[in-house]
Image: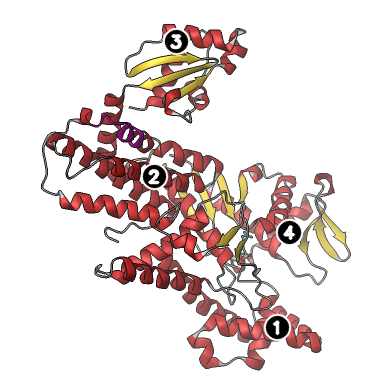
Amino acid sequence: MDYKKLVAEKIQENINVNLQLDFIEGLIEIPPKPEMGDYAFPCFQLAKNLKKSPNIIAQELKDKIEKNYFEKIENQGAYLNFFVDKNTFTRDVLTKVLEQGDKYGSSSIGKGKNIVVEYSSPNIAKPFHVGHLFSTAIGNSLYKMMSFEGYNCTRINHLGDWGTQFGKLIAAYKRWCDEEKLHKDPIKELLRIYVKFHEEAEKDPALNEEGRMHFKRLEDGCKEEVELWKKFKELSLREFKKIYALLGVDFDSYAGESFYTDKMDAVIEEIDKKGLLVESNGAKVVMLDKYNIPPCIVKKSDGATIYATRDLTAAIYRKKTYDFSKCIYVVGMDQSLHFKQVFTTLKLMGEDWADSCVHVGFGLVRFADKKLSTRKGDVIFLEDLLNKSVQRTLEIIDEKNPKLENKLQVARKVGIGAVIFTYLKNNRERDIVFDWNEMLSFEGETGPYVQYSYARGKSILRKSENINGDVDYSKLNSKEEFELAKVLNNFKSSILNAIDKLEPFMVTRYVIDVAKAFNKFYNAHSIINAGDETIKIARLQLVKATCQVLKNGLNLLGIDVVEKM
Ligand code: ARG
């Protein structure tokens, strides 16, 4: 039973204006306090339609609507408050969760819609840093949520594998690279020589010329440069894929910037044909001053294409290839202007789908007060961060539960889960300050807390594996049991909200709410020792359903559950 829909239907049946069901459903609120009911309908919109006071409408609706399925319906000012029949509600929710299992919360709302989700997109020969994990965690969970709701999603890793920096890197390689180190720890060595290049070039600017020359040769397809570039790319991908395996993240396409090198001319020509290309200090640009933003540079004065040229080309290619109804770019907010320029240029080109390109931005990641930068080399490698989190989790397990089986495996899931959880816990535009103690705490709003709640539930279920019998859901009649059932019922709406706002934290918050409601229930009531067999069986169903929802929810965030911890 979808109670929200039921409330909407009852209202629709009892008003004399023609309002869409979805619209009415959208107005329904979940009251903050149980005394205010389980669903509340504000009558302000109807007041406009009916030209009557909202309080009177609430009063009239209260008298008209039949109560079946509801314990009572009350009007409070402009609000109509619905109190569900607790027994029916709890039974309905739990049977639904247990019947649908891993599919609970899913739907086919997105059927027939193609979505491109671009995320992660690290730069080859440079470290995969903590900002890239922000993109990876958000993109991966948006992908999971949208697929769960029936959208047809394509995951793209728009690798930064093209640009003048590769000319510099080739020059640096030829002078200073240590081949052995390169194979052992490729990205560290490539970073070392890249940093050295910048230091040396400050003393000897001729080096920059050398870099430009190598990039030109790379663009022209000269064998030596192309081979070196390929080598850098392969070595880098090898490292990135290790991280993706650790995180359980995948892609459908690794078409990065270099993929578009042979497709850009046609796009530039198109822009020119449409009369949008203007000369500015030798460069070719699209003027955007009408929109109060700086011009979008398409070709630099030396004739080279840039980042934006590749993004314009990529968007057009993706539209042709995937026919998306939305193309999502999960990239830091520091690139907001870039995306505005690219999307606006597409619009000026007459691409009517330009508005379906969305930049999903996010904030900065900090540790104490070190800012991240690749130039100077004081960057935090993601692998180190993840390893450290796993290591620390292992220490905590050793202290709390030294006899646990598969300790390392558990520490991996919990330690990495804790990091991902931290990224997805708040509004994505908010900066993150990493704090180890907070992140790994088993209490408070953390990944380990939610995973621990799941493991605790599973341990109860393991202890009572042989307990079977008819379930009498009416035995679940305490406040805590009803509140937990209510939270379990909200899963789907939290996912749909997260998709609507492109904000995974709405599901993160939701799993925290489930864990909190579960712990309240657990602390207030005995389960195995309930005394009465029928109460025990009913409570076990509630535990089982809770575990299922926690698992489904964490899964959508890209976090694995552990059966024991
Ligand atoms: N490689 C870029 C970086 O690390 C991110 C790419 C973002 N995606 C895009 N389509 N421009 O900053």
As measured in the structure, the alpha-carbon distance from the residue carrying label 4 to the one carrying label 3 is 63 Å
Q: Are marks 1 and 2 in contact (CB under 8 Å)?
A: no
The mark that comes first in sequence, 3 or 2, is 3
Residue 62 is tagged as 3
Which of pointers 1 and 2 lies earlier in the amino acid sequence?
A: 1
**The residue at label 4 has a CB less than 8 Å from ligand 1:** no
Q: Residue 437, percent across and down?
A: 48, 64
Q: Is residue 562 visible?
A: yes
- The circle on residue 516 is 2
Mark 4–mark 2 CB contact (< 8 Å): no
Q: Nearer the viewer, mark 1 or mark 3?
A: 3
Please name the amino acid that badge 3 sits on: Lys
Image position, residue 185 (x, y; %)? 51, 84
Q: Nearer the viewer, residue 485 or 203?
A: 485
Instruction: Identify the amino acid type marked 4.
Output: Ile
Of the numbered discs 1 and 3, the one sitting upstream in the chain is 3
Element under label 4?
A: helix
Q: Secondary structure at mark 1?
A: helix
For the residue marked with disc 2, what is the amino acid?
Answer: Lys
For label 4, the residue is 268
N-term-proximal mark, 4 vs 2: 4
Q: Amino acid at mark 1?
A: His
Residue found 53% across the figure and 53% down from its top: 117
Residue pictured at 49% horizontal, 25% vertical: 28
* Mark 3 element type: helix
Give the mark nearer the N terminus: 1 vs 4.
1
Q: Which residues are magenta?
A: 476-484
Kindly identify which residue carries mark 1.
214
Instruction: From the top left corner, tell me how far across and down residue 564 is, in percent.
Output: 27, 60
- Give me the residue at 34% from left, 37% from top: 484
